[in-house]
């Protein structure tokens, strides 16, 4: 099957070169994208071929999310916690750990479906997720994967293993991860954060990642409590502890947040092959602080940390925050926004090829050129301009409507599961 995009302005996501022509998009994980001078006549098209009129529209590579928490989807509008948190540790205890302990597989499925729909409609076709449900672990990763695939979203998944809920959930998390990766599924070995991961679990996680030729995905120094705990228990700061455990030798690893780092820790990361994800809005929401990522790593990506599924929104927040923390430029921000694709290519994950595209109906009052596109990217283009979305050559959003699932039915299911979850809170 070939999907022909008629008369778009095509923006090369790497060079920002703009071409006004037609595009031919092949299906499949490795489907090709090519510029064509003419679309075949009707009698030359295969029955499965389609033509999408993109006149006046801007087409470019679809987006990716470097760090998500789809399990937070059902938290929107939830009842207030019984006790008001006064610091980050209490936010985790009174809100997020209170929620994740009450999730079951139906709720996880509903969360994944709703999050995948929101991603698709925001132009996001690939998600790197970090999941937690300590009393519904067996089968949780397959449940998320199947829900994502129903909508058409590519994924790298992990379960955030931790010592915080005792031996049973820890062992179940290791077993679920091992089984999921052993079945040939792409993913990470997930850990929560240093302050909930003992030395034994850390060593086992590094070994498991090494055996499956993958990396770890974990939170790092999101709050100073993480550093204080590491200093007290292990006599090292978090990154120094991870370096001693071999984490920095796993180049596919993703470290989320990395806010409260020392100069030595920043040097250790800068000289490693690991990837960092900044999640500015979540950090501001939790009042844990912000930092500059300049010099930390050229391998910095953007994520949402589960706050939403809109990467254009995340990019704008990172740019505005970065003005104060590092004087960030348009070019640097855009590179971070697109680094998820470079990570996925280095990882060897399928599903994020050049046949993942977004069609933008960008109603700009001023001209868009290759020279000024980044200004439009920061100050103009947002999720409301996403008209159609193509994932692995398939239209998964057409004229702002998802095509692979019944959106009304999926969101009704999510609301039902949300009510069940809230009753358990």
Image (cartoon, grey):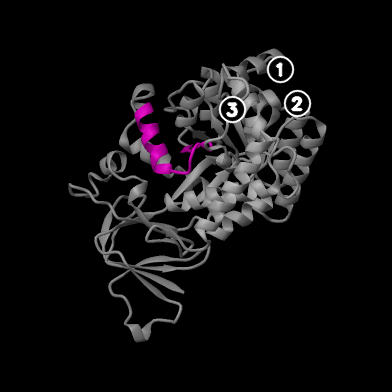
In this view, the residue in front, 80 or 324, is 80
Locate residue 194, reporting x and y percent. Answer: 66, 25
Labelled pair 3, 2 in contact (Cβ < 8 Å)? no
Mark 3 or mark 2: which comes first in sequence? 2
Height in image: 149 above or below 102?
Answer: below
Q: Residue furthest right?
A: 167
Labelled pair 3, 1 in contact (Cβ < 8 Å)? no
Locate residue 355, reporting x and y percent. Answer: 44, 61
Residue carrying label 2: 199
Q: Is residue 378 visible?
A: yes
| Label 3 Cα crowd, 10 Å radius (few <14 / some 14-19 / many 20+) | many
- Magenta range is 300-321
Instruction: Name the side, left or right, on which 375 lies relative to 396.
Output: left
Instruction: Name the side, left or right, on which 88 lies relative to 121.
Output: right
As drawn, the label of residue 421 is: none
Residue carrying label 1: 234
Residue carrying label 3: 220
| Label 1 Cα crowd, 10 Å radius (few <14 / some 14-19 / many 20+) | some
Q: Is residue 156 visible?
A: no
Q: Residue at x 78, y 41 (%)?
A: 172
What is the distance, in whole Å, between disc 1 and disc 2 at their CAs? Answer: 9 Å
Q: Residue furthest bottom?
A: 43
What is the quadrant of residue 235 in the picture? Answer: top right
In this view, the residue in front, 280 or 151, is 151
What is the distance, in whole Å, between disc 3 and disc 1 at their CAs? Answer: 15 Å
Height in image: 201 above or below 394?
Answer: above
Labelled pair 1, 2 in contact (Cβ < 8 Å)? yes
What element does badge 2 sit on?
helix
What is the quadrant of residue 90 in the picture? Answer: top right
């Amino acid at each position: 099957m070939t999907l022909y995009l008629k008369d778009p302005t095509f923006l090369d996501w790497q060079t920002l070169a703009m071409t006004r022509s037609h595009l031919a998009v092949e299906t499949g994980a490795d489907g090709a994208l090519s510029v064509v001078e003419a679309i075949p006549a009707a009698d030359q098209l295969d029955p499965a071929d389609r033509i999408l009129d993109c006149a006046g529209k801007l087409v470019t590579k679809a987006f990716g999310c470097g760090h998500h928490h789809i399990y937070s989807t059902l938290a929107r509008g939830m009842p207030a916690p019984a006790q008001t948190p006064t610091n980050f540790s209490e936010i985790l205890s009174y809100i997020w750990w209170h929620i994740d302990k009450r999730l079951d597989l139906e709720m996880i499925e509903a969360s994944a479906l709703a999050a995948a729909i929101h991603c698709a409609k925001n132009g996001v076709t690939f998600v790197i997720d970090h999941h937690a449900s300590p009393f519904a672990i067996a089968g949780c990763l397959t449940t998320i994967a199947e829900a994502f695939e129903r909508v058409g979203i590519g994924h790298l998944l992990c379960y955030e293993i931790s010592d915080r809920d005792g031996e049973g959930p820890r062992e179940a998390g290791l077993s679920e991860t091992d089984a999921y990766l052993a079945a040939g599924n792409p993913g990470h070995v997930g850990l929560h954060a240093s302050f909930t991961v003992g030395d034994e679990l850390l060593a086992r996680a590094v070994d498991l990642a090494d055996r499956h030729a993958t990396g770890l995905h974990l939170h790092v120094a999101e709050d100073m409590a993480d550093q204080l705990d590491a200093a007290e228990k292990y006599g090292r700061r978090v990154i120094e502890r991870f370096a001693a455990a071999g984490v920095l030798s796993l180049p596919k690893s993703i470290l989320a947040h990395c806010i409260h780092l020392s100069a030595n820790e920043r040097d250790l990361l800068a000289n490693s092959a690991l990837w960092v994800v900044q999640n500015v809005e979540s950090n501001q929401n939790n009042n844990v602080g912000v930092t500059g990522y300049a010099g930390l790593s050229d391998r910095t990506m953007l994520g949402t940390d589960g706050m939403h599924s809109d990467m254009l929104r995340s990019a704008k927040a990172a740019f505005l925050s970065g003005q104060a923390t590092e004087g960030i430029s348009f070019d640097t921000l855009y590179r971070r926004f697109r680094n998820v694709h470079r990570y996925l290519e280095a990882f060897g994950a399928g599903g994020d090829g050049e046949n993942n595209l977004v069609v933008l109906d960008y109603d700009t009052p001023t001209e868009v050129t290759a020279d000024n596109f980044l200004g439009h990217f920061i100050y103009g283009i947002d999720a409301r301009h996403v008209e159609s979305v193509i994932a692995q050559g398939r239209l998964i959003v057409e004229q702002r409507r998802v095509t692979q699932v019944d959106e009304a039915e999926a969101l009704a299911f999510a609301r039902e599961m949300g009510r069940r979850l809230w009753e358990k809170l």
